[in-house]
């Protein structure tokens, strides 16, 4: 069985490189340049993983991730948010909306391969156990965040 990974991003050269790497690893890449069609495509095609650019021109990647995770049909599909922004605020925001991993550019092919393996292995373990638990915490709106 071939693993299918959806790449959602508007940087065609970068995404072409991602697709070539995936293909070499025996993974079937599918590329969508627009975020708007990503949610319906994922719902209909059920890829094994989504590599989602956080900064899309037509739609925010965080919003797409959140929508995927809130939809019963797509909530268990792993999402790796890919971005050049390494700020801790944005990393936390990405994880809060449901990303399984937050990968910051630039990264090597080996780092990407490791990230994909890590996320898919974690998902496979949850499926093997037959349970997937989601825990949500709501922080008070007046809570102060500590910055390091």
Image (cartoon, rainbow, N blue to C red):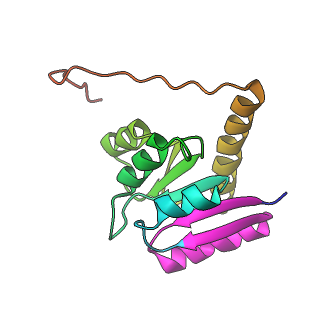
User: Where's residue 113, x and y in %?
Assistant: 69, 55
Q: Is residue 17 magenta?
A: yes
Q: Nearer the viewer, residue 110 or 27?
A: 27
The answer to whether residue 105 of the structure is visible from this angle is no
Q: Position of residue 52 (x, y in %)?
A: 49, 58
Task: Tell me if 135 is positioned left or right of 44 in this view.
Answer: left
> In which image quadrant can residue 47 be found?
bottom right
Furthest-bottom residue in view? 13
Quick check: can you spot residue 26?
yes
For image coordinates 81% across by 60% down, the residue present is: 2
User: Image quadrant for the N terminus?
Assistant: bottom right
Where residue 74 sits in the image (x, y, percent)?
Answer: 55, 47
Viewer-nearest residue: 118 or 131: 131
Q: Is residue 102 magenta?
A: no
Quadrant for residue 119, please give it. Answer: top right
Q: How many marks?
A: 0
The relative height of residue 93 versus residue 110 in the rendered view (above or below) is: above
Magenta extent: 3-31
Q: Name the quarter where the C terminus is drawn.
A: top left
Q: Residue at x 41, y 54 (%)?
A: 64
Residue found at x 37% / y 21%: 137
Describe residue 142's horizontal placement relative to residue 33 as left or right: left
Q: Residue at x 40, y 66 (%)?
A: 36
Q: Residue 131 is drawn in which quadrant?
A: top right
């Amino acid at each position: 069985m071939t693993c299918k990974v959806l790449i959602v991003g508007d940087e065609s050269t970068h995404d072409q490189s991602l697709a070539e790497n995936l293909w070499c690893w025996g993974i079937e890449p599918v590329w969508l340049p627009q975020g708007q069609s990503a949610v319906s495509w994922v719902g209909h095609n059920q890829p094994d993983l989504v590599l989602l650019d956080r900064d899309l021109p037509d739609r925010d990647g965080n919003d797409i991730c959140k929508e995927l995770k809130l939809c019963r049909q797509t909530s268990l599909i792993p999402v790796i948010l890919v971005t050049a922004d390494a700020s801790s605020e944005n990393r936390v925001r990405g994880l809060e909306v449901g990303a399984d991993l937050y990968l910051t550019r630039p990264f090597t092919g080996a780092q990407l391969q490791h990230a994909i393996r890590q996320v898919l292995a974690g998902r496979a373990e949850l499926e093997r156990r037959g349970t997937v638990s989601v825990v949500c915490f709501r922080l008070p709106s007046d809570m102060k965040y500590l910055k390091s």
